[in-house]
Image (spheres, coloured by chain):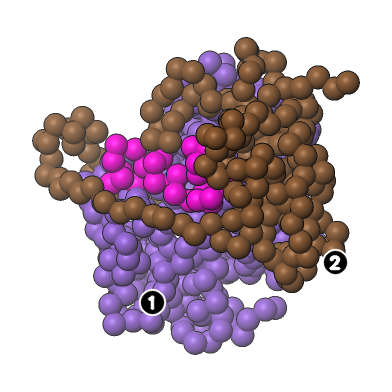
Amino acid sequence: MSEKIKRFPGEELKGADIRVGKVPTIRFRPRVRYLWSAGVAMSRFIEGLKEGKIVASTCEKCGRIMVPPRAFCEECFKPVDGYTPVKDTGTINTWSVSYVAGDASRIKEPILVAVIDMDGASTGMGLLHLLGEIDDWKQIKFGMRVKAVWKPPEERTGNITDIRYFKPVKEV
Amino acid sequence: MVGKKRVAVIGAGMTLFRRNLKETGKELAWHASKMALDQAGLELNDMQSVVMGTAPDAFDGVHMKGEYLADGAGAWRKPYSRVFVGGGTGVFAIDAGWWHVASGQFDTCLVVAEEKMSSCYPHPAYAFTTIFDPIYSRPLGVTLIWIFALEMHRYMHRHGIKKEEIALVSVKNKRNALDHPCAQLGANITVEDVLNSEIMCWPVQRLDISPTSDGAAALVLASEDVAKKLTDNPVWIDGTGWCIDTTFWTNRDLYYPRYVQCAAQMAYKMAGIKNPPKEIDVAEVYDPFDYKELHHMEGLMLARKGQAPKLTADGVTQRDGDLPINPSGGLLGVGNPIAAAGLMKCCEIFWQLRGEAGKRQVKGDPRTGLAQAWGDLMQYGSVVIMRS
Ligand SMILES: [Zn+2]
């Protein structure tokens, strides 16, 4: 707003009026679907998941072991030198508890989510995933150690969801 | 000084920001553009180029949104480009407008930003689920609010920041917005209200978040020669900066936005600013969530790492404080029509530096102001520095 401007345009509508058709509207529902090629690096990753492995890519120039794997190192801007499995354990870098679904509707049983720094990958190489086998989310801690809980081999489809979630583990 | 020509802002306009507006995106863009031209005392014919900033096509449901909006922005038969860098779009739009004129290619540029989020039904949040990597993220059901909650939590953990300290930002901005005639969510609320509001995605609660909105904003830019003929009161664009980080957001430490720092350093260098907290008189910092204002103050080097909550608690960032942040009311108070919200921040700095902000005017005749926006997968920063 400037003091010089006396009136700002825009006519507010009430959400309820829109839904019951009190204001002129037109509806449309797009019907598009997608089928993605997983690509060079991520094909290795999802093939690995089928075998119960988390596959990273390695760059000999900068020494990084990268999860998720990529076909080229974005820092060195060169092809990666190979692919290697890392461990399926890690440390919680940050976490959250979601009571909201993708369409902003509310859910009763919260979804526990975390970025997990993977053991065997370079420092700070986190993976986004879910947490499970936790009774009360207030038990989740930064730095907590977790391990992947895999679907049985016959149920795996080559998808990030072949890991059901990560569960807390006690260190020996 | 980078650029061949000095560039001024000479007019600004905006519409109301509301959850639902009757006007189409094109009509909103027209209202804001017309107001900015009127304020500059110019006609559309005087505009040699047009830059449109608008965020995902999925909101409007028109998959060539820049083209669809073009005549609302007065762009027909003109050099026109649409820019899009997620939430960073609004401030990047003025950066892009600046290079149109600074390069010497054009004497004038109309910069317009529009967002009509309400068209995506029943809630625009669902459109955001398509921003994530399809292979390793989307099958998990990831949503935008997850990733902000993860960033907020990491920031709180790293510096030992409490929710109460962050809630002060929401309290301040919603109160500031009571004085903004376009505001959607101006309110007098308390820290307790924020802490007692619905848990959306811990640590994010309902009153930590800006709303979804419809709205538009516009600015008229002109080269120095043109600006000096038209106004005694130009506001100069003395610094621009923008930077992107990798989309591998889980491979970065989310406690600090390095890409925002990079964008700020670019803008400070251009503007000759050595000591940002001393030299910036007023700032509009991107605040789609309350923690983001603090996070961005640190990225912009207006506060040391982890110190923005203390400045807030001490009242430094209030409208009458030493470093007023978001005197407009920000996204938390005025509303968040994505690209238009970023350009609204540029409008606010323009009005503040002209001394036209009325009840929102910060004290002490501000001469140097900053606006900043942020977006994509927590990876993009855009900054502009203006002087009167
Ligand atoms: Zn490398």
Side of A119 where A127 appears, left or right? left
Disc 2 from disc 1: Cα separation? 43 Å
Q: Tell me the residue that label 1 is attached to.
A: B80
Q: Is residue B385 left or right of residue B268?
A: left
Labels 2 and 1 share a subunit: no
Q: What residue is drawn where x is 67% and y is 78%?
A: B2
| Residue nearest the observer in this picture, B148 or A128 | A128
Asked whether mark 2 lies closer than 8 Å to ligand 1, one says yes
Q: Amino acid at mark 2?
A: Lys
Tell me: residue B104, above or below residue B345. Answer: below
- Work out which residue is located at the far right of the displayed protein and give it: A172
Q: Which chain shows up in purple?
A: B
Q: Is residue A108 left or right of residue B349?
A: left
The reply to whether residue A76 is visible in this rendering is: yes
Q: Residue at x 76, y 52 (%)?
A: A84
Q: Amino acid at mark 1?
A: Tyr
Residue B182 magenta-highlighted: no
Secondary structure of the residue carrying tag 2 is: loop
Residue where numbered disc 2 is placed: A61
Q: In front: A22, or B303?
A: A22
Instruction: Give the image quarter of residue A14.
Output: top left
What span is in magenta? B117-146
Give yes or no for residue B141 being in the magenta stretch.
yes
Q: Colour of chain A?
A: brown
Q: Quadrant of the C terminus of chain A?
A: top right
